[in-house]
Amino acid sequence: MVENRHNMNRSWNLFHKRVNMKIAIIGAGASGLSAANYLKKLGYHDVTVYEKNSYVGGKVFSYTYKDKMYDLGAIIFGKKDNYKISHELLTRFDIPLEEFVTPEILYMDGRQIAFEDYLKENYTVFNTLKAAILFVRLYFKFRGYFRKGFIHASPELFISFNAFVQKHKIESFADTLKPFFVGCGYGYYEDVPTIYLLRMLFWFVRSRLRLKGMIRTIEGLPIVWTEIRLL
Ligand SMILES: Cc1cc2nc3c(=O)[nH]c(=O)nc-3n(C[C@H](O)[C@H](O)[C@H](O)COP(=O)(O)OP(=O)(O)OC[C@H]3O[C@@H](n4cnc5c(N)ncnc54)[C@H](O)[C@@H]3O)c2cc1C
């Protein structure tokens, strides 16, 4: 009995010592703010988040043009099973959501159209079909390398995507998707290593076939991280 009480006191003291610990988190992006939020939930109360920018959210950032908001970083939340923490936060803050149906392209003149309509407007059916066939060929050639991590990847996948496109003569395929990838900020074909863009391409095309369950916030993604800051 005395020993039990002694153990309980010891655990309480340890817990007390731990939750009084001073914790510094560098960066108020999604990772830093979720970490702060969860530490607070666990009882830690001396947590400070340091941010070099004047806004929170990091790569989650939106821009308003003519009263309309455009996400410049992250756009969508994946399905609940893979994005448990994010979905929990969305529910907790009661953030208005809509289903993510199709990406949109914004022209320089402010015209906004669905990605499929962009393709119809800019490419012939022949071009798009050719791109699709090349994609399937590429997918079967390289899909083995698209496990997590980079260690197993072929060195060929580390050259710039532009060099890869020229080597495999897949310009039509690459051009078709260029506005989406460059426009969304995933990088310029001249700079980005092939493995990064191909992973994105495979994910993108596969997920187009099963988009159900993907959502986005109506008022832009930064709202999630602004709300969490106020907790
Ligand atoms: C164009 C684009 C589209 C994307 N689309 C999606 C999507 O649709 N869905 C999705 O789930 N994910 C998407 N992502 C990925 C997602 O945005 C990131 O994984 C996520 O935002 C990373 O969060 P983070 O907190 O780890 O890093 P960051 O967002 O980079 O945050 C790091 C923070 O640390 C700050 N910082 C850095 N150094 C210091 C320092 N020395 N002192 C103080 N502060 C510092 C930075 O200013 C920044 O605010 C996309 C990313 C990009 C770029």
Image (cartoon, rainbow, N blue to C red):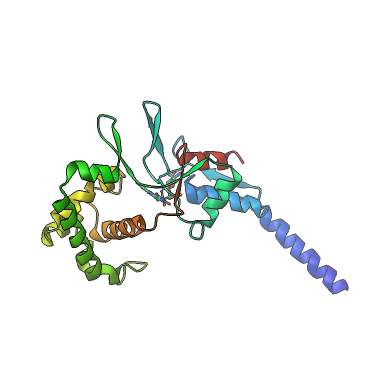
Residue drawn at point x = 39 percent, y = 58 percent: 210
Question: Residue 13 versus residue 54: which sits nearer the camera?
Answer: 54
**Residue for point 54% across, 41% down:** 95
Q: Position of residue 25 (x, y in %)?
A: 53, 49
* Figure quadrant of the N terminus: bottom right
Classify the position of the C terminus by image quarter.
Answer: top right
Please tell me which residue is depicted at 44% across the width and 37% down the height of the picture: 53
Q: Is residue 151 visible?
A: yes
**Extreme front residue here?**
125
Residue furthest out toward the right: 1
Residue at the image position 70 percent from the left and 57 percent from the top? 17
Q: Quadrant of residue 179?
A: top left
Residue 63 higher or lower than 78, as above or below: above
Q: Position of residue 135 (x, y in %)?
A: 22, 61
Q: Is residue 206 left or right of residue 78?
A: left
Count of marks overlaid on the render: 0
Viewer-side residue, 119 vs 150: 119
